[in-house]
């Protein structure tokens, strides 16, 4: 008999140790069929990424510097930037990444919806596409089908790959999202949450509020997120032999709420904790731990000390 080649990771590989709740809510249902995106659609969405992810936020940086020079920036505007960074940044790290992609913990559907809405307000793409691209990355990390390996160039890993962001097989790489009514509602209403991420700062702080709480905030969060793809596959330490170029980078670890401990993550993708030692700052893990303490998160997953010791190899550092 011939062998069957799989396009991507199995459901078990992508989301190991599914809870009974997840199985009853998702695995009992068939994967909804979606129409493959045409080349024109993928190209058009790539054009939108160039405009709204590269160009517009970059203009926001120029305008932020200009407003500082003009002396019109107030504490309110700085506060809007910080709050927007915290909400949309953790929406990506806790919501899109550790909850929706890796299912490293469980929470109430309302909390899940809020986390995914905050992640959508970061404007990095609908949760369906984001999860599919990330699972595809793990399945092919730094190999031919990795969507954002720096083997294809540092700029490609950081920004360039977004031109093909919509070119991903969601049925293969994100079947659980397709079965998840909460995630799919947020994914289908993605334009609404992106619009809100700019309208709300404008209503609160006017044009300067839009610049600092919207455009400049988006530019900052984009670059921190994309630094995980580029910087954290080029610069840093590799305590675990993961078979790819993933590294731990403390700068991205701090700015990215724990996402910079990327070699740890590739060694233990199921873990809600990317910082595995007390000195590895992981704000996202602290949030999940706080949620667990008040009963808003459960089945929080973390490798045991034995698992950690078993994965350790010869540490290397890439500069």
Image (cartoon, rainbow, N blue to C red):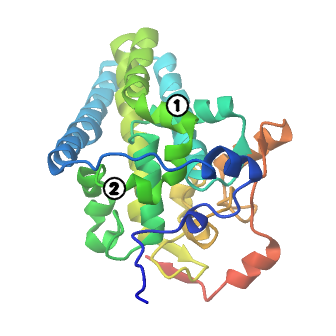
Task: Give the spatial CA distance, label 2 vs label 1.
Answer: 22 Å
The answer to whether the residues at label 2 and label 1 have Cβ atoms under 8 Å apart is: no
Residue at horizontal 25 percent and vertical 42 percent from the top: 49
- Is 293 in front, or is 58? 293
- Is 172 in front, or is 288? 172
116 with respect to 53 (left or right)? right
Which mark sits nearer the N-terminus, 2 or 1?
1
19 with respect to 198 (left or right)? right
- Is 50 in front, or is 227? 50
Q: Residues within 10 Å of mark 2 (few under 14, many from 20)?
A: many
Residue at horizontal 39 percent and vertical 14 percent from the top: 202
- Split into 4 quadrants, where in the image is the N terminus? bottom left
The dot on residue 45 is none
Image height of 120 relative to 298, above or below: above
Q: Secondary structure at mark 2?
A: loop
Residue with the mark numbered 2 = 168
Across and down, in percent, residue 319 comes to 43, 76
Q: Quadrant of residue 211?
A: top left
Residue at horizontal 61 percent and vertical 89 percent from the top: 314
Across and down, in percent, residue 128 comes to 44, 45
Across and down, in percent, residue 147 comes to 34, 63
Residue at horizontal 33 percent and vertical 28 percent from the top: 64
Residue with the mark numbered 1 = 117
- Is 319 in front, or is 85? 85
Image height of 102 relative to 315, above or below: above
**Eye-nearest disc, 2 or 1:** 2
């Amino acid at each position: 008999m011939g062998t069957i080649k799989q396009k991507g990771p199995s459901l078990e590989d992508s989301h190991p140790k599914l809870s009974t709740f997840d199985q009853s809510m998702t695995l009992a249902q068939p994967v909804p069929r979606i129409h493959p995106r045409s080349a024109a659609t993928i190209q058009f969405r790539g054009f939108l990424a160039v405009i709204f992810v590269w160009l517009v936020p970059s203009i926001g940086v120029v305008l932020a510097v200009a407003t500082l020079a003009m002396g019109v920036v107030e504490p309110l505007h700085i506060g809007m930037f910080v709050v927007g960074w915290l909400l949309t940044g953790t929406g990506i790290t806790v919501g899109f990444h550790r909850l929706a992609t890796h299912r490293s913990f469980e929470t109430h559907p309302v909390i899940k919806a809020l986390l995914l809405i905050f992640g959508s307000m970061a404007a990095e793409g609908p949760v369906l596409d984001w999860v599919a691209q990330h699972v595809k990355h793990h399945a092919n990390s730094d190999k031919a089908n990795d969507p954002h390996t720096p083997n294809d160039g540092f700029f490609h890993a950081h920004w360039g790959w977004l031109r093909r962001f919509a070119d991903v097989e969601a049925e293969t790489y994100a079947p659980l999202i397709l079965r998840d009514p909460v995630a799919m509602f947020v994914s289908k209403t993605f334009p609404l949450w992106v619009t809100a991420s700019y309208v709300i700062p404008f209503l609160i702080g006017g044009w300067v509020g839009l610049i600092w709480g919207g455009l400049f905030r988006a530019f900052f969060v984009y670059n921190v997120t994309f630094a995980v793809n580029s910087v954290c596959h080029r610069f840093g330490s590799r305590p675990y032999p993961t078979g790819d170029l993933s590294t731990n980078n403390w700068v991205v670890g701090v700015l990215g709420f724990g996402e910079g401990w990327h070699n740890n993550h590739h060694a233990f993708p199921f873990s809600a904790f990317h910082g595995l030692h007390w000195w590895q700052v992981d704000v996202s893990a602290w949030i999940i731990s706080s949620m667990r303490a008040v009963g808003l998160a459960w089945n929080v997953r973390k490798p045991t000390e034995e698992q950690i010791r078993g994965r350790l190899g010869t540490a290397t550092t890439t500069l």
